[in-house]
Amino acid sequence: MTRNSTSLLAMKMDDQPASSHVTEGPELEVTLATAENQTYQDMLETLCNQSYNKVNATAPSPKLFVFTVYGVLLTTVGLLGIAGNLISITILSRPKMRSSINCCLIGLTSFDMIVTSTSILMFGLSEICEYTGAMTWYSNGIYQRVTPFVYPLGMIAQTGSIYLTVTVTVERYVAVCRPLQARSLCTYGRAKVYVLVVAFFSIIYNLPRFWEVSYQVCRLDNMEEIVIVVPSALRQNDHYIQIYIMWMYLFVMYLVPFLSLMVFNSFIYREVRAANQERQRLSRLERKEIGLAVMLLVVVTVFFLCNVLAFIINVLELSRIVIDELTVTSNLLVTINSSVNFIIYCIFGQKFRRVFLKMFCSRMLPASLARDRANSTYCEPSRFLTNGGATETICLPTSSGHRRSHPLATHGTPRTSLNTTMESTYHNRRNDFYEYDKKEQSSFQCFD
């Protein structure tokens, strides 16, 4: 049987927890290679017997490398990624964040959260069970029963994540390079349609995955029951492997999205470079679009870095070359790609960062925030006349943070000259205050 390392979420039917009573290694390969000469039921009985013999034999010690990557790194990154994706969805769903690109990012983040969850269930927890011998309740039945559903769900989420990345790229291309068409194409209503179309395509394309694997309850002669994950007859079909798993997967999941991202992002990058050279002439809206385009370029760059190894593995599969260490590393990189977008949004998304700080950090510095706002308070000037003299008071913040009154008094000055002098002094001090206020507020714009 060709092992399923061609998928980014590579589920290896011949590499499951030892405690789950499943055959590993060459024995399973031999069994499946001779499956054509057996009935499917005979093959299941052979797998059950081999699993039972393996469980009662002296098992080799688990690999430290696989446990480190799957049990420690992937599980930790996945859990942090789920938390970050939940926060991202909460922020992007707020009314003030309503926009076409944020609608697409909500869909992308949702798919990423499913990818990280399925990665933990299929790789992280199972490897922890095998290496430590803990959580036998999961490895002795639950893992085998949920895998036939978790596996296709992860593949659907992975497909949706890839094509929503392409969708966001096209949306930014239209907004930056075709601004006249953006008014009709980049709307919130159309963005919801784009997300639904991608979700529908992802489900339809991955429907055969639901019939690739199943679980089998084996009842042995001594009345003991063991549960194993077994490949279906469809998964063993040579034509299915060559056409769907190999070539269609390479074309649909790599060639089309990778080439699309390269072409559209080259146009976006060229436009961003040209805009940076004429940044002073850009309007506020244009600068905002350029900023979002830069954030997207970072997202796509991380996507390429985390998925290029999976592309290499897929090409090697065509030559029947399988390297387990590369597959393990690739699954970790895919999980990282689905977990780091929250960090990218915080670094490059000014509005996202501002809303995040308001929601989660504003209570940490209430006194500082109140003091900073008090420092920038402007007092309307009061003007009054006493015995032929005029006094004007303007409140300005001082370097120590306290307001100071500046009385401007004149005595014995003609009324016309007095008004001229006062107006001139007032406008000069007001301009000085506004310049100071801008500097002060720029330090706290993330909280405003």
Image (cartoon, rainbow, N blue to C red):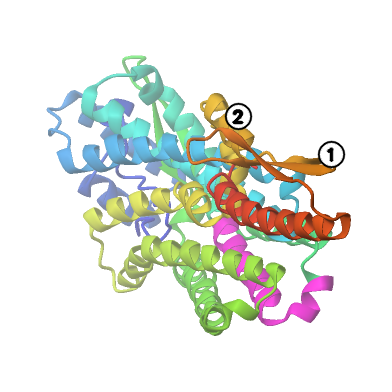
Residue 32 located within the stretch drawn in magenta = no
Q: Quadrant of residue 226?
A: top left
State which quarter of the image contains the C terminus: top right
Give me the C-alpha separation between circle 1 and circle 2.
31 Å
Amino acid type at image mark 1:
Phe
Residue under pointer 1: 384
Magenta stretch? 159-184
State which quarter of the image contains the N terminus: bottom left
Q: Provide residue 82's location: percent of width, then percent of height.
A: 50, 37
Task: Describe residue 222's horizontal placement relative to residue 401 as left or right.
Answer: left
Q: Dot 1 surroundings within 10 Å: few (below 14), some, or many (20 or more)?
A: few
Task: Describe residue 375's horizontal placement relative to residue 384 as left or right.
Answer: left
Q: Nearer the viewer, residue 313 or 275?
A: 275
Residue 29 visible in image:
yes
Relative to 435, residue 54 above or below? above
**Which residue sits at x=26%, y=29%?**
130
Q: Provide residue 129's location: percent of width, then percent of height.
A: 30, 26
Residue 241 visible in image:
no
**Which residue sits at x=53%, y=40%?**
398
Q: Nearer the viewer, residue 434 or 355?
A: 434
Amino acid type at image mark 2:
Ala
**Which residue sits at x=46%, y=71%?**
250
Q: Nearer the viewer, residue 284 or 44?
A: 284
Residue under pointer 2: 370
Toward the top, the furthest residue is: 223
Q: Which label number is shown at residue 169?
A: none
Q: Provide residue 121's location: percent of width, then percent of height.
A: 43, 34
Dot 1 or dot 2: first in sequence order is 2
Task: Describe residue 68's horizontal placement relative to residue 33 as left or right.
Answer: left
Label 2, secondary structure: give it.
Answer: helix
